[in-house]
Every structure is written in C-alpha cells, then in structure tokens.
C-alpha cells in the first residue's frame, strides 16, 4: 500500500490509483457520517461503523456483523482500517512496555504503556503518545529532539497508538478500561501539530467511541506560544508544561527553541490559561545530573513556583548508553526536594519507569535506526 502524507488516503496499487481508499481512522464522527451518506447508507450506519472501529476495535469490515453484506462489501471497496504496525516491543522489569510502531509510509514512532497500582489495588495503565515523527524543538537531553522533525503524525496515526495498546492489553471493557490515562509526552511537540492533535482529542472524547474524558488526558508542551490558547479554549485535556530549568539562560541552553518564548512571558501567559474547577497546570522538571540539580537551582525553582498556580513533578533523568547527560545522584535529588519542601512547594517525584528499556522518548527509535 502506498500512503499519502496527512491525507489518510491509501492506494491499493499503482494500476488502481484512480480509486484511493480512505483509512477510516482519519475521520472524526462528522467526517464518517458524510462518508457513509455518500455511500447511500442511512445515518445510523455511521454510528455502527464508528462503534466497530473505536469500541470493538475491528480492523476488517467482515467483522461488522450488524451491517449488511452488501454494505460491508461497499465499505471494503472504498475504505480500509489501518493501524500502525508493531515493529518491536520492549518490556521492562517494572512492567513498562515500549512499542516501536511502523506507520504506513515506513516511518517509525514510539508509544509506551506504564502500569501503576491504584488505591483499590487494581492495575491502571497510562499511555504515553507520540504526535510527530521526530521533533523540531531540539531539546538537548532528548533523543527525539536530536533527529529533527520528519513529519507530523495524522489524526488517525495518533489515535492508532491507543488502539494498538488496547488490543495488546486485551482491554475490551468500556465500563472499566484498563487503559486509564493518556499523556501526549512521547515523540513530538503537540502544540506544533494541533491541527491533528485537537481532532484526535475530540475523537478520544466521543462518548460512543473511546470515551476518554478530558480529565484522563494530559497534553504536555515544552512551552510553545502558538497553540496554547487554542488548546485551552478546547477544554479537551489537562496541560503540562516542561520547565526543566529555573532561569532563562539555562533553559536557552537545554531547550533552545522553547526558550525563544522567554520564561517570564510564558509564565505570565499561563497565569490566564483557562482552567476548570480544581484543575491546575502541571509543571515538569527533569533533573539532569550536574546541570540543573544543584541547591541553587532548587531555590530558583522554588521562587518561580511561588509565583504560579500549579503542581510540580520532578522526573529523574534516565541515563542510557550514548547519553550526553548523566542521571542525578540520589543525594542531589533528596537535597533538591528538601529545599522545595522548605519553601512550601509540593513536588512529586515521578518514579523512573522502564530505565532498563530506554523508555525516554525517542531512545528506541534512535537505536532501531542505528541498527538499520
Ligand atoms: Fe521535542 Fe519533547 Fe523531545 Fe523537546 S523533549 S525535543 S519537545 S519531543
């Protein structure tokens, strides 16, 4: 199959190029309704197909048993349901599982599922989603940032990651899904691909589809000015912002593109970001050994956090073979936390998951590319 970038159109072969097939993952609900109407089918057919795609995870029209044979044949003639293919799976001793996915044009992206135990003792899974192949932001500590931007992922490709994970987990119960939370924290900068990320959030939110409420989705940005307002107005996800440095100079060094929007201006804009009741912005701070983990940095960060309303997550960097940066020592992390607490800043240390499988974004894809 040949694939047209960002169109969702798939041509079965060269000689049949006059009749491209559409990947139905690329349609939001109104789009699917229009498509089904063009086939001469009644409106309720769109809902049946929608539920087969998103709730029952059908990949073959023949599975759609409540749809007539004639309609199934017509759908198969005009459309396909194509998910990203699993190229590799790496499983960590802590249960974190990383997938290298091959998209229809041969590009690769990563997605990670991370288990945790709820207060009720039941396992919940969070999934880290990619939204671009590569990334233009060039963050110094990030393997994806080092490869540059190759292309945006389409809406269907973004959503396909969720179907792959649910299928892998055999997560078929809609009333109590195992896959509980989604975070856009994989490859790419979501605000740089909002034209695909926003429709994907709408599809995720559809109550007859995957039914992820906005409270179960977090979009993480390195702090891009463009798109922040659109995301806030949509109300379709929580916001996380990667700080990673407590001052403009250090931020410019390790996050060169993001830092073009000065830190103080970014924080001013975030002060008026629309939040729901009890919602707070999450700030992420990645502790890099010897770079941003000193008591001086902790004091500056405490002063910064005193000015904004938000939660602070501390993430301890996972060093892997070939990394330029080092993990911070446990003593440095403890001292850093203590300074924050002494300034009444609640910082939650996010446990490093999947350290043995290079779970940080872009690491598996980079390794795969080196082996090709
Ligand atoms: Fe892009 Fe995120 Fe990596 Fe920065 S950390 S380069 S924004 S993928």
Image: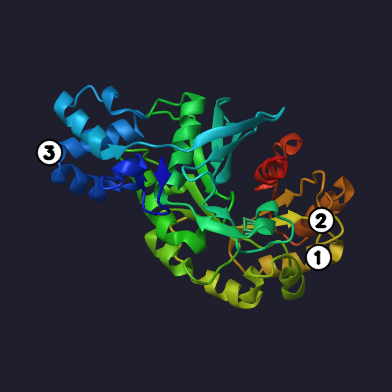
User: Toward the viewer: 71 or 272?
Assistant: 71
Residue 98 bears which disc, if any? none
Element under label 2? helix
For label 2, the residue is: 336
Element under label 3? loop
Q: Whole-percent x and y of residue 5?
A: 43, 53
Q: Is residue 23 visible?
A: no
User: Toward the viewer: 49 or 75?
Assistant: 75
Cα distance between the residues tagged 1 and 2: 8 Å
For label 3, the residue is: 41
- Examine the rendered structure and indicate whether residue 18 appears above or below residue 83: below
Q: Whole-percent x and y of residue 285?
A: 70, 57
68 vs 204, left or right, is left
- Examine the rendered structure and indicate whether residue 190 appears above or below residue 111: below
- Examine the rendered structure and indicate whether residue 280 appears above or below residue 122: below
Q: Quadrant of the N terminus?
A: top left
238 vs 96, left or right, is left
């Amino acid at each position: 199959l040949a694939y047209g970038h960002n169109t969702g159109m798939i041509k079965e072969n060269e000689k049949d190029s006059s009749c491209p097939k559409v990947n139905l993952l690329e349609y939001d609900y109104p789009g699917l309704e229009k498509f089904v109407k063009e086939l001469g089918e009644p409106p309720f057919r769109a809902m049946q197909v929608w539920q087969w795609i998103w709730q029952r995870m059908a990949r073959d029209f023949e599975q759609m048993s409540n749809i007539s044979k004639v309609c199934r044949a017509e759908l198969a003639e005009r459309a396909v349901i194509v998910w990203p293919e699993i190229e590799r799976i790496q499983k960590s001793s802590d249960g974190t599982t990383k997938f290298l996915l091959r998209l229809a044009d041969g590009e690769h992206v990563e997605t990670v599922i991370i288990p945790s135990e709820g207060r009720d003792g039941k396992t919940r899974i969070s999934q880290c989603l990619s939204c671009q192949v590569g990334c233009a932001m060039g963050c110094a500590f990030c393997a994806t940032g080092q490869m540059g931007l190759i292309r945006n992922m389409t809406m269907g490709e973004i959503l396909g990651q969720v179907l792959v994970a649910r299928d892998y987990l055999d997560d078929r119960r809609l009333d109590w899904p195992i896959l509980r939370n989604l975070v856009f924290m994989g490859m790419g900068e979501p605000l740089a691909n909002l034209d695909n990320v926003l429709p994907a959030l709408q599809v995720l939110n559809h109550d007859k589809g995957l039914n992820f409420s906005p409270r179960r989705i977090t979009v993480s940005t390195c702090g891009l000015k463009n798109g922040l307002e659109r995301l806030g107005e949509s109300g379709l996800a929580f916001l996380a912002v990667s700080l990673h440095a407590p001052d403009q100079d250090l931020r410019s060094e390790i996050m060169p593109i993001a830092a073009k929007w000065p830190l103080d201006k970014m924080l001013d804009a975030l002060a008026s970001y629309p939040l729901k009741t009890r919602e707070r912005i999450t700030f992420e701070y990645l502790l890099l050994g010897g770079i941003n983990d000193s008591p001086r940095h902790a004091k500056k960060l405490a002063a910064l956090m005193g000015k904004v309303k938000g939660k602070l997550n501390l993430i301890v960097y996972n060093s892997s073979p070939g990394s330029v940066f080092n993990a911070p020592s446990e003593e440095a992390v403890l001292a850093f936390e203590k300074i924050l607490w002494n300034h009444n800043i609640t910082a939650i240390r996010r446990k490093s998951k999947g350290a043995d499988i290079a779970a940080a974004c872009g690491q598996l894809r980079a390794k795969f590319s080196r082996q090709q």
